[in-house]
Every structure is written in C-alpha cells, then in structure tokens.
Image (cartoon, grey):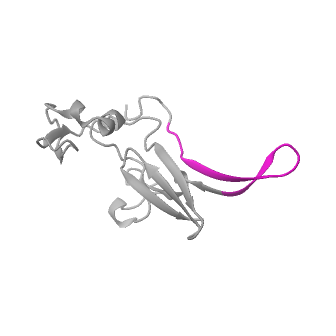
Amino acid sequence: DLIPDNEVWDNLIVELQPNGRGSADIVWQWSLWDHLVQDFDSGKPNFGVVSEELGRFDLNFCPPGGKPAQRNLELLAGAKAKERTAYVRSNTGRTTFEIPIEGKTGEKDWVHANSVSYCPQRDQVLISLLVPCEIIVVDH
C-alpha cells in the first residue's frame, strides 16, 4: 500500500576507471542505501530516531502529494486534508495551500537525483534531490 510500484530505487554514484581491457573498474562509489534511517521497524539495522540522525535520510519520507506535487504545487490546490495538514507556499507567490498527508504517495524513484556535480577544489560530490528538495555534499 505504501509502495504502489512494489519496488524502491537506490541512488548510486559510481566513479569508473577504464582498465584497458574494454571495461572499467570501480574506484569509488556512494549509495543512498548506506545513509538511511527509519523509525518503523526496530529489528532493522537502520532503525533510529529520525530527528537525531543528521546526515541520514528517512526511508519512510513521503512528501505531500508525492513527486508529481513536487513538480507542480497547483496539483495540491483545493485538496482537502485528511489526516494532518502541511502548508507550502507556491513559487508563484499565490496563497498557501493545505496539503493532505496520507502517507500513500511512495514510489520507486522516491528521491530522484536531478544532478550530480564534482568539485575538484574540495574533492566533494554534490547531489541534487528533487523530492526531498535537498542538496547533499559528499566527501569524495
């Protein structure tokens, strides 16, 4: 019910070095799966208090309206709150919307990395995530 596609995608960054044999070797990688926290199942190794786990992403994060609403806040206009209400101001400067938070807008591409950039001066990788509206800075 929470994952209508029955799958969840990882975000993986891989640095490859050509090996001269027609393929490449992995010289560095970063996976979002290594940086998750959840407060649903205490039997899982990534269990914790989400608000206390800085630098980790809540595996159960589900934004109001899901990914479509993150792209177009107009989809949320006029929606009636069912469980609780969050308030988001649109980038057009219009009035604040009440947004239903039902927890059933999960999908396989739950964070969607829009871009990845490398900063050689700092030896850091920057990742822009669409759905949580976050920019991650990763030490390379």
Question: Is residue 18 magenta-colored?
Answer: yes
* Residue shown at 40% from the left, 61% from the top: 48
Task: Identify the image quadrant of the N terminus.
Answer: top left
Along the horizontal axis of the image, is 43 left or right of 94? right
Would you say residue 46 is visible in this rendering?
yes
Which residue occupies 85% across, 43% down? 22
Front residue of 134 and 39: 134
Q: How many marks?
A: 0
Residue displayed at 50% across by 34% down: 7
Query: In which image quadrant can residue 49 be found?
Result: bottom left
Q: Is residue 27 left or right of residue 106?
A: right
- Report the magenta residues as a range: 8-28
Quadrant (top left/top right/bottom left/bottom right) for the C terminus: bottom right
Outermost residue to the right: 21
Q: What residue is drawn where x is 50% and y is 48%?
A: 115
Q: Estimate the x, y position of residue 8 in percent, counting from the top left.
A: 49, 38
**Residue 38, image x and y in percent?**
41, 53
Q: Toward which corner of the image does residue 82 lie, by quadrant?
A: top left
Indicate the position of residue 106 as horizontal and vertical percent values. Answer: 38, 36
Q: Tell me where residue 33 appears, x and y as whole percent.
A: 53, 52
